[in-house]
Each structure stands twice: as structure tokens, then as C-alpha cells.
Image (cartoon, rainbow, N blue to C red):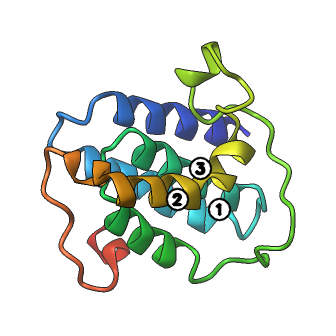
Amino acid sequence: MLWHTALIHVANAILGDTKDPAWRFYLFFCVKTYGELRRSFRFAETIGRSILSMTLQQGDLTAEEARRLMVQFEENRLTSPAEDIRATFMADLNLAMTDPEEASVESLSDRFDDIALFREFTNAGDSSEDEPVESDDNTWDTL
């Protein structure tokens, strides 16, 4: 389980420094890695979704871009959306200090659609300093 702790820390470090030009590559790498790990660890599917929720919540991705990435992430999902994957450990390490319940993987994963909808209606998703990733229908191929 050391890989899990390390990858959560990498994802949080990336989201803490989005001024770095390579941050998107490392974010996609983390999400893609969790997508690959879900074959062996079912909860990894929920973590990938929660990382995208964190990124969207911080305004580092547009809602459109986040939804496109989520569709790609969920293409080969192992479970149906109705299945409940329990993951009560922390994903957002900064938020965990003030609101541990909202910082959990489970909570962030469940809130992805709400966060995306909020960003779309408030146009807050357009606040990213970086240009959105060009859509070639498979962002994962850039890794």
C-alpha cells in the first residue's frame, strides 16, 4: 500500500503548484495510474475520480475538460455506478485539516457532478491560467 500513500501525496503536491508547466502531465499520470490500478484495487477507481474532483473544485480545470477526462477515465470501469465503493481515507490533504469528512475520497468522488455543474453555471471553470488540453478524444495517449 505504499504506492497509494505516495500517489496521493504526489497528486496533492501537483495541485498545490499549478504554476509549474508540467503539472497537467503529472495530474494525468496520477489519474491514469489509478485507472490502471483499479484492476487490482477496486478503491483506486474512486480515488481517480476524487482527484479530478479536487482539480475541478480548485478551478484548475474547466468543467468541460474535467468531464471529458472523467469519460476517458470511466471507459474501462470495473464497477457499475450503483455499486458503493467505501473509501473513507483522505484525498485532499489540505482540506483534511479543517473538514475531514469533505476531504475523504468517497465524498470528493460523489461530488464530482455537483462541482462540475456548479463550475458550468458560474463560469468558474474558465479561471484556469493554462489553456485547456487539446481534445484528441484520448488525452491518455499523451502519457
Q: Quadrant of residue 141?
A: bottom left
Which tag is nearer the camera, tag 2 or tag 3? 3
Q: Quadrant of residue 107?
A: top right
What residue is shown at x 46% (from left), y 32% (from top)? 12
For the residues bearing labels 2 and 3, Cβ distance under 8 angstroms: no
Q: Residues within 10 Å of mark 1 (few under 14, many from 20)?
A: some
For the residues bearing labels 3 and 1, Cβ distance under 8 angstroms: no
Type of amino acid under label 2: Thr
Residue 55 drawn at (x, y percent): 41, 45
Q: Does residue 67 appear left or right of residue 109 in this picture?
A: left
Type of amino acid under label 3: Ser
Q: Which mark is residue 50?
A: 3
- Observer able to see residue 48: no
What residue is shown at x 77% (from left), y 59% (from top)? 41
Compute the Cα span from label 3 to label 1: 15 Å
Type of amino acid under label 1: Leu
For the residues bearing labels 2 and 1, Cβ distance under 8 angstroms: yes
Q: Which mark is residue 33?
A: 2
> Which quadrant of the rendered structure holds the C terminus?
bottom left
Compute the Cα span from label 2 to label 1: 6 Å
Which of disc 1 and disc 3 is earlier in sequence? 1
Q: Which residue is mark 1?
A: 37
What residue is shown at x 52% (from left), y 21% (from top)? 94
Residue 113 drawn at (x, y percent): 56, 61
Q: Residues within 10 Å of mark 3 (few under 14, many from 20)?
A: many
Secondary structure beneath dot 2 equals helix
What residue is shown at x 47% (from left), y 60% (from top)? 117
Q: Does residue 57 appear left or right of residue 48 in this picture?
A: left
Q: Quadrant of residue 46?
A: bottom right
Which of disc 3 and disc 2 is earlier in sequence? 2
**Looking at this view, is 140 or 106 the one in front?**
106
